[in-house]
Amino acid sequence: MPSFSFSPLAGTLVTQAVTDTAGGIGSGNIPSGARYAEGYVRTASIVETRDGTAPTATATEWDEGDIILLRSRYEIVNFLAIEKAGGSSETIDWQFYNRAPN
């Protein structure tokens, strides 16, 4: 039996709007203890990077309904996304955890 509980940090469900300009989760929305995050792509396709560089059309692509896993504080803080195709409103719902599941 594990010696910890893999439960979300309380009150940390955050919705990130994704536009045609590269944007991150927002430092004010990232809990200090967050070391892992799961993001649900709610609407349309997005492209992302995890190293702080602006994403382009050739970056990693995620489609509506996909789950994005960020497995470190570095990836959470440096995550940037843009919409894949202009003219629509994309969102990602994020839930944060203080550790990654085993």
Image: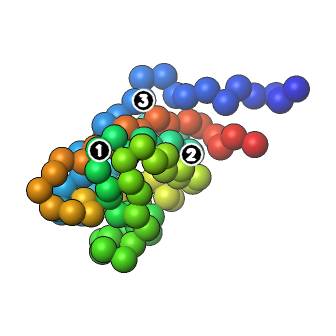
How many labels sit on residues? 3
Give whichever of discs 3 and 1 has the lower sequence position.
3
Residue 12 visible in this rendered orientation of the protein: yes
Tell me whether the residue at label 1 lies in contact with that at label 2, contact meaning CB atoms closer than 8 angstroms. no
Q: Which image quarter is the N terminus in?
A: top right
Q: In the drawing, what numbered circle is on residue 12?
A: 3
Mark nearer the viewer, 1 or 2:
1
How many angstroms separate mark 1 from mark 2 (CA)? 25 Å
Determine the residue located farthest toward the left in the rendered image: 87
Residue hosting label 1: 43
SS category of the residue bearing label 1? loop
The residue drawn where x is 40% and y is 30% is 13
Is residue 82 something one can see in this rendering? no
Helix, strand or loop at label 3? It is: loop
Quickly name the residue at label 2.
35
Label 1: how many Cα within 10 Å (few below 14, some 14–19, many 20+) = some
The disc label shown at residue 91, or none: none
Residue 58 drawn above or below residue 1: below
Work out how far the residue at label 3 is from the one at label 1, CA to CA, in angstroms.
20 Å
Q: Residue at x 42, y 43 (%)?
A: 65
SS type, badge 2: loop
Taking the image as shown, residue 36 lies to the left or right of residue 53, namely right
Residue 91 found in image quarter: top left
In this image, 22 relative to 72: left or right? left
Q: Specify the amino acid type for callout 3.
A: Thr
Question: 51 or 19: nearer the eye?
Answer: 19
Q: Is residue 90 above or below residue 48?
A: above
Q: Position of residue 32 (x, y in %)?
A: 47, 39
Q: Are marks 3 and 1 in contact (CB under 8 Å)?
A: no
Depth check, mark 3 against mark 1: the one in front is 1
Quadrant that contains the C terminus: top right
**Amino acid type, callout 1:** Thr
